[in-house]
Image: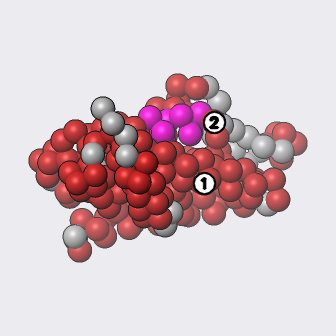
Amino acid sequence: MSLDPLAIVTAFGLIFLAELPDKTMFASLAMGTRMRPLYVWFGTSTAFLVHVAIAVGAGSLIGLLPGWTVKLVSALLFAFGAFMLLRGGGGDEDEKAGTKTVTGFWPVYSTAFMAVFISEWGDLTQITTANLAASNGTWSTAIGSAAALMSVSALALLAGRFIATRVPLRTVQRIGGLCMLGLAVWSVVEIFVG
């Protein structure tokens, strides 16, 4: 196994730029306002690692899943995330506490993992990773792609925490919920427009 530094940098740069405007980045940002960011990052990072392994090892597997099914499940998960953010506690206790986060490693980890794992099937970054692996080597591409995806998730979570300290939590949750709802609608629209 030999690593090609240029292939690592190429994969990192392409995947990082492709993932920045992606719905997964916004989902990470929204989850990070309500859940423990480190736990969210572990969940999203694990899902990204699995996707990179699948893309590098067997990119053709993506074609076996019906695209509309993946998008529908993704829409449902985003809708559930929107519901969780928009329902809010609404009590005086939340205001006094200043912040309210979903705690517990496994609930946060599994929510973040599933949201990313399902919504990333057939995504541009997964397809790009599969294409890069075919021409630039599997290990170099895997390292560059995984590092890029995990970096974007960390960046989104840091931005979410920065915003949450300057804007009232209730406002951040509503905006995050509306973003998740928008992502759910976007995923449904993608079913019909391809």
In magenta segment, residue 55: no
Q: Overall secondary structure of the magenta stretch?
A: helix
Q: Position of residue 79 (x, y in %)?
A: 44, 54
Above/below status of 90 relative to 42: below
Which residue bears the numbered disc 2?
38
Identify which residue, 181 or 70, lies in the foreground.
70
Q: Is residue 70 left or right of residue 63?
A: right
Q: Amino acid at mark 1?
A: Ala
Q: Is residue 165 left or right of residue 34?
A: right
Which residue bears the numbered disc 1?
156
Q: Quadrant of residue 187?
A: bottom left
The residue positioned 48% from the left and 45% from the top of the image is 147
Identify which residue, 99 or 45, lies in the foreground.
45
The residue positioned 47% from the left and 64% from the top of the image is 17
In magenta segment, residue 44: yes
Q: Position of residue 27 (x, y in %)?
A: 51, 54
Q: Position of residue 26 (x, y in %)?
A: 53, 59
Report the number of numbered marks: 2
Q: Amino acid at mark 2?
A: Leu
Above/below status of 123 relative to 56: below
The answer to whether one can see residue 119 in this image is no
